[in-house]
Amino acid sequence: MSKICYVSMAFGVKPDPTSARPVDYDRVYRELILPAVQQAGLTSTRADDFAGTLILKDIAKAVITADVMLADVSNGNANVMYELGIRHALCRGATVLLTSTRLPFNIAQTHALKYDLAVDGGPEPGRLAPTIAQLANVLRRKAEETVNDSPLYEYFPSLRIDLPADLRLPERRSRIYPAEAQGSASSEPDRKTSVERAEQITRSTQNVDPQAYLDLLRRYRNLSEWKEVLRLARELPAGVADLPQVVQTVALALARLDRTDEAIQVLLTPS
C-alpha cells in the first residue's frame, strides 16, 4: 500500500504581497508538487479531496497521520501555518517545507526547499525539472525515516504526546519506546551508568522506536561523554545515522575531542 503525503497549501490564485504578480497555487500543485509526490512513490492528498460535514476533522486527522506532510509555507498562508503547527505539536515526523518566499520567523531555522515562480504565477519552467527531482528525493527519504524532525521535539526532547491508535503514524502504531531511554524526569542529575542501562534495554527491545536511540545519543551528549556519542552513532540502525541531528551531534563530539578536521568533513559530507 502506498504511503500518504498530505499536501498543505493555498488554493487558487493569490496575490503575492512581495510583488505585483499573482501566484497560481493550483498550477504549483499540478506542475511541481504532484509530479514530485508521484515520483517519490507516494499518494498525494489535499484538503479539497475531503467532502462531507466533517471536513475539518478529516483534514486534522490527515495532518497528524500522514506518512509525510508537505507544507507550502509561501507568504505564511494562515491555514497552512495552522496545519503545520498541529503537525509539529502532535507528530514527530516527517514534514517537508516548500516555499517561494522567505520563511516566517518562527520556522526560519527549519530547512525548506525553495522553488521559483515565473511572471505568469506558475512554477519557473527553466527550474521545474530539477526542482521536481530534488523534492521527490527529499520526500522519498523522509517517507523512509521514522524519527523526529519536529523542531518542537528538538527544543523539548522529553515531550511525549499520547495519541490514540487511530491518530498515530501507521508504522509507529506497533513500535515500542522504552521509558528508560528518555531518562528520569526528576531533578537528579543523569548518570552514565543510567544511560548505559537504558541502552541495554533499548537494544534488547523488539521493534523499538528509533527515537529511543536519538534520546540515548542526546543523554550521552549532555554528559559530555563524547567517545560514547561516537560509538553509539556508529552503531545506530539504518536510516537513523544520517539524520541531521545525529550528524550535528557527531560533529560536536569530534570537535570536543580536538578532531576539528573530521568534524568539518562530517558536516560537509552530503547525507
Image (tube, rainbow, N blue to C red):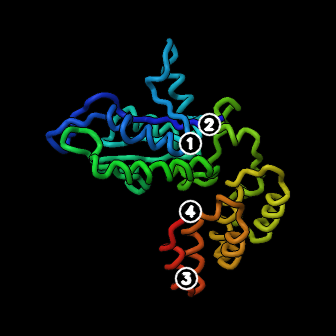
User: Is 72 located above or below residue 229 in the figure?
Assistant: above
In terms of secondary structure, where does tag 3 sit? helix
- Residues at marks 1 and 2, CA–CA distance in whole angstroms: 7 Å
Residue at position x 27%, y 47% from top?
124
Quarter in which the N terminus is drawn:
top right
Checking the image for residue 262, the label placed there is: 3
Instruction: Give the image location of residue 262, x and y in percent.
Output: 55, 82
Which residue is under mark 2?
2
Q: In the rendered structure, which amino acid carries the disc numbered 4?
A: Gln
In terms of secondary structure, where does tag 4 sit? helix
At label 4, counting other C-alpha atoms closer than 10 Å, the crowd grade (few under 14, some 14-19, many 20 or more) is: some
- Residues at marks 3 and 1, CA–CA distance in whole angstroms: 36 Å
In terms of secondary structure, where does tag 2 sit? loop
Q: In the rendered structure, which amino acid carries the disc numbered 3?
A: Glu
Q: Which of marks 3 and 4 is in front?
A: 3
Q: In the rendered structure, which amino acid carries the disc numbered 1?
A: Gly
- Residues at marks 4 and 2, CA–CA distance in whole angstroms: 28 Å
Which residue is under mark 1?
41
As drawn, the residue found furthest toward the bottom would be: 258
Would you say 7 lies left or right of 128 here?
Answer: right
Toward the viewer: 128 or 57? 128
As drawn, the residue found furthest toward the top would be: 53
Quadrant in the picture for residue 123: top left
Q: In the rendered structure, which amino acid carries the disc numbered 2?
A: Ser
Is tag 3's residue or tag 2's residue first in the polypeptide sequence? Answer: 2
At label 2, counting other C-alpha atoms closer than 10 Å, the crowd grade (few under 14, some 14-19, many 20 or more) is: few
Which residue is under mark 4?
245
Is tag 3's residue or tag 1's residue first in the polypeptide sequence? Answer: 1
- Residues at marks 3 and 4, CA–CA distance in whole angstroms: 17 Å
- Residues at marks 3 and 2, CA–CA distance in whole angstroms: 39 Å
In terms of secondary structure, where does tag 1 sit? loop
